[in-house]
Image (cartoon, helix red, strand yellow):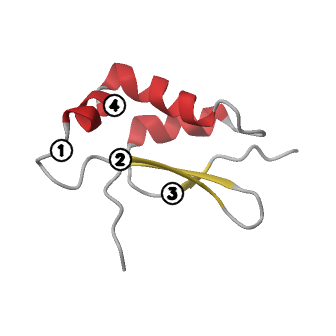
Amino acid sequence: MQFINESVKLTTDSQGLQYLEIHKPLDTKSSNKTKHILAPNNLKKHVYTMIKDLPNIDYTIVNQAIQECSGIPINITMTHQ
């Protein structure tokens, strides 16, 4: 098992679903860059920059993930109803 110590991660699974994971730094010696990204007024801008070119994103779920910073990957793909 390998831990990836990045506070914001984005991935696409084999079915094309987009997942976003946001968590606080794993260590207390986080870089200034990480602290800057996770500052409340910077986090949303950083995440939106990461997803701006992705299709079918549910921004309501993205905003919820930003608020919660749970560390759990969340499916942010918009479901067509």
> What residue sits 65% from the left and 30% below the top?
52
Residue, far right:
81
| Rendered location of residue 62, percent (x, y) | 57, 37
Disc 2 packing (10 Å; few <14; some 14–19; many ≥20): some
Can you tell which mark lies on residue 50? none
Horizontal arrangement in the rendering, residue 80 relative to residue 46 (left or right) = right
Can you tell which mark lies on residue 73? 3
Q: Of marks 2 and 1, which one's residue comes earlier in the chain? A: 2
Q: Of marks 2 and 3, which one's residue comes earlier in the chain? A: 2
Can you tell which mark lies on residue 7? 2
Alpha carbon distance from label 2 to label 3: 12 Å
Q: Name the image quarter holding the N terminus.
A: bottom left
> What residue sits 23% from the left and 55% below the top?
26
Alpha carbon distance from label 2 to label 1: 10 Å
Residue, far bottom:
1
Kindly check if marks 2 and 1 are in contact, taking CB atoms under 8 A apart as contact: yes
**Label 1 belongs to which residue?**
30
Alpha carbon distance from label 4 to label 3: 18 Å
Vertical placement of 16 versus 32: above or below? below
Vertical placement of 5 versus 67: above or below? below
Q: Of marks 4 and 1, which one's residue comes earlier in the chain? A: 1
Q: Look at discs 2 and 3 and give the one toward the viewer.
A: 2
Circle 2: residue type: Ser
Element type where label 3 sits in the image: loop
**Label 4 belongs to which residue?**
37
Kindly check if marks 4 and 2 are in contact, taking CB atoms under 8 A apart as contact: yes
Residue 14 falls in which quadrant of the image?
bottom right
